[in-house]
Image: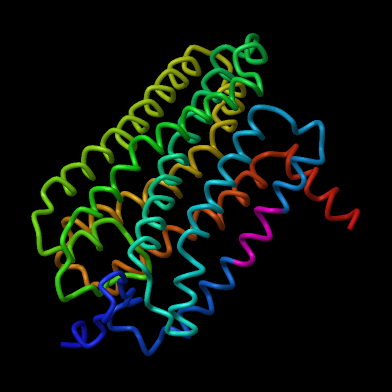
Amino acid sequence: MAAFNLTPPDPSTFILNGIPGLEDAHIWISIPFSMIYIISLLGNFTLLFVVSKEQTLHKPMFLLLCMLVFTDIGICTSVMPKALCIFWFHSKSITVDGCLTQMFFLHGIVSMQSAVLVVMAFDRYVAICDPLRYDTILTNARVATLGLVGLVRAVVLVLPVPLLVRRLPFCTNRVILHTYCEHMAVVKLSCGDTTLNQMYSLVITFIIIGSDLILIGLSYGLIIRAVLMISSKRTHQKALNTCTAHICVMLVSYTPYLFSGLTHRFGHGIAAHVHILLANIYLLLPLMFNPIIYGIKTKELREKVVKCICRM
Protein backbone atom coordinates (compact mmCIF):
# COMPACT_ATOMS: atom_id res chain seq x y z
CA MET A 1 0.00 0.00 0.00
CA ALA A 2 2.89 2.37 0.71
CA ALA A 3 4.08 2.03 -2.86
CA PHE A 4 0.66 3.04 -4.22
CA ASN A 5 0.42 6.00 -1.86
CA LEU A 6 3.68 7.29 -3.31
CA THR A 7 2.50 6.91 -6.89
CA PRO A 8 2.90 10.25 -8.66
CA PRO A 9 -0.20 11.68 -10.28
CA ASP A 10 1.80 12.65 -13.37
CA PRO A 11 2.27 9.58 -15.63
CA SER A 12 5.44 11.15 -17.05
CA THR A 13 7.32 10.70 -13.77
CA PHE A 14 8.69 7.93 -11.60
CA ILE A 15 9.36 7.90 -7.85
CA LEU A 16 12.81 6.83 -6.63
CA ASN A 17 12.13 5.29 -3.24
CA GLY A 18 15.72 5.35 -1.96
CA ILE A 19 16.63 2.41 0.25
CA PRO A 20 13.47 0.43 1.15
CA GLY A 21 13.10 -0.23 4.85
CA LEU A 22 15.79 2.29 5.79
CA GLU A 23 13.93 5.51 4.95
CA ASP A 24 14.29 6.78 8.52
CA ALA A 25 18.05 6.31 8.33
CA HIS A 26 18.51 8.10 4.99
CA ILE A 27 20.09 11.17 6.56
CA TRP A 28 22.62 9.02 8.44
CA ILE A 29 23.41 6.92 5.37
CA SER A 30 24.01 10.13 3.40
CA ILE A 31 26.86 11.22 5.71
CA PRO A 32 29.44 8.56 4.73
CA PHE A 33 28.18 8.53 1.13
CA SER A 34 28.57 12.30 0.69
CA MET A 35 31.94 12.42 2.46
CA ILE A 36 33.36 9.59 0.36
CA TYR A 37 31.99 11.17 -2.82
CA ILE A 38 33.40 14.65 -2.14
CA ILE A 39 36.81 13.43 -0.92
CA SER A 40 37.08 11.02 -3.85
CA LEU A 41 36.27 13.78 -6.34
CA LEU A 42 39.00 15.97 -4.83
CA GLY A 43 41.49 13.09 -5.06
CA ASN A 44 40.61 12.25 -8.65
CA PHE A 45 40.68 15.85 -9.84
CA THR A 46 44.06 16.29 -8.12
CA LEU A 47 45.36 13.29 -10.06
CA LEU A 48 44.02 14.69 -13.34
CA PHE A 49 45.60 18.08 -12.57
CA VAL A 50 49.00 16.56 -11.81
CA VAL A 51 49.03 14.41 -14.97
CA SER A 52 47.99 17.36 -17.15
CA LYS A 53 50.68 19.66 -15.70
CA GLU A 54 53.62 17.23 -15.62
CA GLN A 55 55.06 16.68 -19.09
CA THR A 56 56.88 13.54 -17.94
CA LEU A 57 53.52 11.91 -17.24
CA HIS A 58 52.20 12.41 -20.77
CA LYS A 59 52.54 8.71 -21.54
CA PRO A 60 50.05 6.02 -22.64
CA MET A 61 49.79 4.47 -19.17
CA PHE A 62 48.86 7.78 -17.54
CA LEU A 63 46.53 8.72 -20.40
CA LEU A 64 44.70 5.46 -19.73
CA LEU A 65 44.63 6.26 -16.02
CA CYS A 66 43.02 9.63 -16.81
CA MET A 67 40.40 7.86 -18.94
CA LEU A 68 39.69 5.52 -16.04
CA VAL A 69 39.36 8.47 -13.66
CA PHE A 70 36.90 10.20 -16.02
CA THR A 71 34.76 7.05 -16.19
CA ASP A 72 34.82 6.70 -12.38
CA ILE A 73 33.73 10.32 -11.99
CA GLY A 74 31.07 9.92 -14.69
CA ILE A 75 29.56 6.75 -13.17
CA CYS A 76 29.33 8.20 -9.68
CA THR A 77 28.16 11.67 -10.76
CA SER A 78 25.37 10.22 -12.90
CA VAL A 79 23.87 8.71 -9.74
CA MET A 80 25.12 10.24 -6.48
CA PRO A 81 23.72 13.82 -6.71
CA LYS A 82 20.16 12.52 -7.16
CA ALA A 83 20.67 9.89 -4.44
CA LEU A 84 21.81 12.62 -2.02
CA CYS A 85 18.76 14.72 -2.95
CA ILE A 86 16.60 11.75 -1.97
CA PHE A 87 18.46 11.33 1.33
CA TRP A 88 18.56 15.04 2.25
CA PHE A 89 15.46 16.65 0.73
CA HIS A 90 13.16 13.68 0.02
CA SER A 91 13.25 14.77 -3.64
CA LYS A 92 12.14 11.42 -5.02
CA SER A 93 10.37 12.39 -8.22
CA ILE A 94 12.19 11.97 -11.55
CA THR A 95 10.78 12.42 -15.04
CA VAL A 96 10.69 9.47 -17.40
CA ASP A 97 13.13 11.26 -19.75
CA GLY A 98 15.42 12.07 -16.82
CA CYS A 99 15.27 8.45 -15.66
CA LEU A 100 16.11 7.08 -19.12
CA THR A 101 18.92 9.62 -19.54
CA GLN A 102 20.44 8.59 -16.22
CA MET A 103 20.10 4.93 -17.23
CA PHE A 104 21.88 5.55 -20.54
CA PHE A 105 24.79 7.48 -19.03
CA LEU A 106 25.23 5.06 -16.14
CA HIS A 107 25.34 1.89 -18.23
CA GLY A 108 27.16 3.58 -21.10
CA ILE A 109 29.99 4.84 -18.88
CA VAL A 110 30.26 1.42 -17.18
CA SER A 111 30.76 -0.05 -20.67
CA MET A 112 33.38 2.61 -21.42
CA GLN A 113 35.19 1.83 -18.17
CA SER A 114 35.34 -1.85 -19.09
CA ALA A 115 36.89 -0.93 -22.47
CA VAL A 116 39.54 1.18 -20.70
CA LEU A 117 40.43 -1.77 -18.45
CA VAL A 118 40.91 -3.95 -21.56
CA VAL A 119 43.28 -1.41 -23.11
CA MET A 120 45.15 -1.23 -19.79
CA ALA A 121 45.60 -5.01 -19.89
CA PHE A 122 46.93 -4.71 -23.46
CA ASP A 123 49.27 -1.95 -22.27
CA ARG A 124 50.71 -4.26 -19.60
CA TYR A 125 51.02 -7.10 -22.14
CA VAL A 126 53.06 -4.94 -24.54
CA ALA A 127 55.18 -3.51 -21.71
CA ILE A 128 56.17 -6.99 -20.51
CA CYS A 129 56.09 -9.15 -23.64
CA ASP A 130 57.38 -6.67 -26.22
CA PRO A 131 59.06 -3.83 -24.30
CA LEU A 132 61.39 -2.77 -27.12
CA ARG A 133 58.42 -1.93 -29.36
CA TYR A 134 56.27 -0.41 -26.62
CA ASP A 135 56.80 3.19 -27.75
CA THR A 136 55.90 2.38 -31.34
CA ILE A 137 52.92 0.10 -30.60
CA LEU A 138 51.27 2.18 -27.88
CA THR A 139 51.47 5.85 -28.76
CA ASN A 140 49.24 8.47 -27.17
CA ALA A 141 47.37 8.84 -30.46
CA ARG A 142 46.70 5.09 -30.65
CA VAL A 143 45.51 4.97 -27.04
CA ALA A 144 43.16 7.88 -27.75
CA THR A 145 41.83 6.01 -30.81
CA LEU A 146 41.21 2.88 -28.75
CA GLY A 147 39.39 5.02 -26.18
CA LEU A 148 37.22 6.47 -28.94
CA VAL A 149 36.40 2.95 -30.17
CA GLY A 150 35.33 2.05 -26.62
CA LEU A 151 33.10 5.14 -26.51
CA VAL A 152 31.44 4.30 -29.84
CA ARG A 153 30.88 0.70 -28.70
CA ALA A 154 29.25 1.93 -25.48
CA VAL A 155 26.88 4.29 -27.31
CA VAL A 156 25.89 1.75 -29.99
CA LEU A 157 25.25 -1.12 -27.55
CA VAL A 158 23.72 0.80 -24.64
CA LEU A 159 21.49 3.27 -26.53
CA PRO A 160 18.83 0.58 -27.28
CA VAL A 161 18.45 -0.09 -23.53
CA PRO A 162 16.51 3.12 -22.66
CA LEU A 163 14.76 3.02 -26.05
CA LEU A 164 13.42 -0.47 -25.30
CA VAL A 165 12.31 0.67 -21.83
CA ARG A 166 10.45 3.63 -23.34
CA ARG A 167 8.21 1.28 -25.35
CA LEU A 168 7.06 -0.55 -22.21
CA PRO A 169 3.65 0.21 -20.66
CA PHE A 170 3.72 1.27 -17.00
CA CYS A 171 0.60 0.92 -14.87
CA THR A 172 -0.36 2.25 -11.45
CA ASN A 173 2.81 1.44 -9.52
CA ARG A 174 5.59 3.73 -10.72
CA VAL A 175 7.77 3.54 -7.60
CA ILE A 176 11.36 2.42 -8.31
CA LEU A 177 12.73 0.60 -5.28
CA HIS A 178 16.19 2.07 -5.76
CA THR A 179 18.19 5.28 -5.43
CA TYR A 180 18.75 5.51 -9.19
CA CYS A 181 17.21 4.29 -12.45
CA GLU A 182 18.90 0.92 -12.64
CA HIS A 183 17.71 -0.87 -15.77
CA MET A 184 16.19 -4.00 -14.22
CA ALA A 185 14.62 -2.04 -11.35
CA VAL A 186 12.69 0.05 -13.90
CA VAL A 187 11.84 -2.91 -16.15
CA LYS A 188 10.24 -4.75 -13.20
CA LEU A 189 7.65 -1.96 -12.89
CA SER A 190 6.21 -2.65 -16.33
CA CYS A 191 2.87 -4.42 -16.67
CA GLY A 192 3.76 -5.54 -20.21
CA ASP A 193 6.02 -8.19 -21.72
CA THR A 194 9.63 -7.47 -20.66
CA THR A 195 11.22 -10.55 -22.25
CA LEU A 196 13.00 -8.53 -24.95
CA ASN A 197 14.40 -6.07 -22.38
CA GLN A 198 15.71 -8.83 -20.14
CA MET A 199 17.22 -10.77 -23.04
CA TYR A 200 18.91 -7.69 -24.50
CA SER A 201 20.30 -6.79 -21.08
CA LEU A 202 21.84 -10.24 -20.71
CA VAL A 203 23.20 -10.19 -24.27
CA ILE A 204 24.97 -6.84 -23.95
CA THR A 205 26.29 -7.80 -20.50
CA PHE A 206 27.88 -10.86 -22.10
CA ILE A 207 29.12 -8.90 -25.13
CA ILE A 208 30.61 -6.08 -23.08
CA ILE A 209 31.68 -7.53 -19.73
CA GLY A 210 32.06 -11.14 -20.89
CA SER A 211 34.16 -10.40 -23.97
CA ASP A 212 36.24 -7.82 -22.09
CA LEU A 213 37.03 -10.29 -19.31
CA ILE A 214 38.02 -12.88 -21.93
CA LEU A 215 40.40 -10.39 -23.60
CA ILE A 216 41.85 -9.38 -20.23
CA GLY A 217 42.29 -13.07 -19.30
CA LEU A 218 44.04 -13.71 -22.63
CA SER A 219 46.40 -10.78 -22.05
CA TYR A 220 47.33 -12.02 -18.59
CA GLY A 221 47.70 -15.59 -19.85
CA LEU A 222 50.29 -14.37 -22.37
CA ILE A 223 51.95 -12.23 -19.68
CA ILE A 224 52.24 -15.22 -17.30
CA ARG A 225 53.66 -17.37 -20.09
CA ALA A 226 56.26 -14.70 -20.93
CA VAL A 227 57.21 -14.25 -17.26
CA LEU A 228 57.63 -17.99 -16.71
CA MET A 229 60.11 -18.09 -19.57
CA ILE A 230 62.35 -15.66 -17.68
CA SER A 231 64.88 -17.40 -15.45
CA SER A 232 65.53 -14.54 -13.00
CA LYS A 233 63.18 -14.51 -9.99
CA ARG A 234 63.90 -10.83 -9.48
CA THR A 235 62.77 -10.12 -13.02
CA HIS A 236 59.66 -12.26 -12.35
CA GLN A 237 58.76 -10.10 -9.39
CA LYS A 238 59.47 -6.84 -11.19
CA ALA A 239 57.33 -7.85 -14.18
CA LEU A 240 54.40 -8.96 -12.05
CA ASN A 241 54.60 -5.84 -9.87
CA THR A 242 53.88 -3.73 -12.94
CA CYS A 243 50.52 -5.52 -13.21
CA THR A 244 49.51 -5.30 -9.54
CA ALA A 245 47.78 -1.93 -9.79
CA HIS A 246 45.74 -2.98 -12.82
CA ILE A 247 44.71 -6.28 -11.19
CA CYS A 248 43.57 -4.44 -8.03
CA VAL A 249 41.59 -1.92 -10.10
CA MET A 250 39.88 -4.75 -12.00
CA LEU A 251 38.90 -6.46 -8.76
CA VAL A 252 37.50 -3.20 -7.39
CA SER A 253 35.60 -2.48 -10.62
CA TYR A 254 34.32 -5.86 -11.79
CA THR A 255 33.66 -7.83 -8.60
CA PRO A 256 31.03 -5.52 -7.02
CA TYR A 257 29.43 -4.90 -10.45
CA LEU A 258 29.01 -8.60 -11.21
CA PHE A 259 27.85 -9.34 -7.67
CA SER A 260 25.26 -6.55 -7.79
CA GLY A 261 24.02 -7.60 -11.24
CA LEU A 262 23.69 -11.26 -10.30
CA THR A 263 21.91 -10.57 -7.01
CA HIS A 264 19.47 -8.27 -8.80
CA ARG A 265 18.49 -11.06 -11.19
CA PHE A 266 18.89 -14.20 -9.11
CA GLY A 267 19.33 -13.19 -5.46
CA HIS A 268 15.66 -13.23 -4.52
CA GLY A 269 16.50 -14.22 -0.94
CA ILE A 270 18.63 -11.11 -0.35
CA ALA A 271 16.87 -8.24 1.43
CA ALA A 272 16.12 -5.25 -0.83
CA HIS A 273 17.96 -2.75 1.37
CA VAL A 274 21.11 -4.92 1.36
CA HIS A 275 21.11 -5.16 -2.42
CA ILE A 276 20.55 -1.42 -2.93
CA LEU A 277 23.20 -0.46 -0.39
CA LEU A 278 25.67 -2.72 -2.23
CA ALA A 279 24.58 -1.26 -5.58
CA ASN A 280 25.45 2.24 -4.30
CA ILE A 281 28.69 1.18 -2.65
CA TYR A 282 29.97 -0.48 -5.83
CA LEU A 283 29.63 2.87 -7.62
CA LEU A 284 31.68 4.65 -4.95
CA LEU A 285 34.41 2.04 -4.52
CA PRO A 286 36.28 2.57 -7.82
CA LEU A 287 36.09 6.36 -7.47
CA MET A 288 37.62 6.10 -4.00
CA PHE A 289 40.19 3.34 -4.47
CA ASN A 290 41.50 3.61 -8.04
CA PRO A 291 43.60 6.77 -7.55
CA ILE A 292 44.87 5.40 -4.23
CA ILE A 293 45.90 2.10 -5.85
CA TYR A 294 47.78 3.80 -8.70
CA GLY A 295 49.23 6.41 -6.35
CA ILE A 296 50.68 3.71 -4.10
CA LYS A 297 51.83 1.32 -6.82
CA THR A 298 53.21 3.86 -9.33
CA LYS A 299 56.31 5.52 -7.92
CA GLU A 300 56.58 8.13 -10.69
CA LEU A 301 52.99 9.29 -10.17
CA ARG A 302 53.31 9.25 -6.38
CA GLU A 303 56.39 11.47 -6.49
CA LYS A 304 54.76 13.97 -8.82
CA VAL A 305 51.62 14.18 -6.67
CA VAL A 306 53.69 14.77 -3.51
CA LYS A 307 55.77 17.37 -5.36
CA CYS A 308 52.63 19.17 -6.54
CA ILE A 309 51.06 19.15 -3.05
CA CYS A 310 54.29 20.51 -1.50
CA ARG A 311 54.26 23.42 -3.98
CA MET A 312 50.81 24.39 -2.72
Report the magenta residues as a range: 38-45
The furthest residue to the right: 311
Q: Relative to 94, is 202 on the left or the right?
A: left
Where residue 184 sits, quadrant-wise, is: bottom left
- Quadrant of the rendering where the N terminus is positioned: bottom left
Q: Relative to 151, is 14 on the left or the right?
A: left
- Quadrant of the rendering where the C terminus is positioned: bottom right
Residue 246 position (above or below residue 38): above
289 vs 175, nearest the viewer: 175
Residue located 80% across and 31% down the image: 56
Residue 113 position (above or below residue 285): above
Q: Position of residue 70 (x, y in %)?
A: 58, 46
Residue located 63% across and 9% down the image: 133
Residue 158 position (above or below residue 275): above
100 vs 121, nearest the viewer: 100
Report the label total: 0
Residue located 51% across and 21% down the image: 125
43 vs 94, nearest the viewer: 94
Q: Position of residue 44 (x, y in %)?
A: 65, 53
Where residue 15 sits, quadrant-wise, is: bottom left
Q: Position of residue 134 (x, y in %)?
A: 63, 15
Q: Relative to 256, is 177 on the left or the right?
A: left
Task: Please tell me whether the stretch drawn in magenta is mainly helix, strand or loop.
Answer: helix
Residue located 50% across and 44% down the image: 249
Q: Is residue 301 magenta?
A: no
Q: Position of residue 244 (x, y in %)?
A: 54, 37
Specify the color scheme.
rainbow
118 vs 244, nearest the viewer: 118
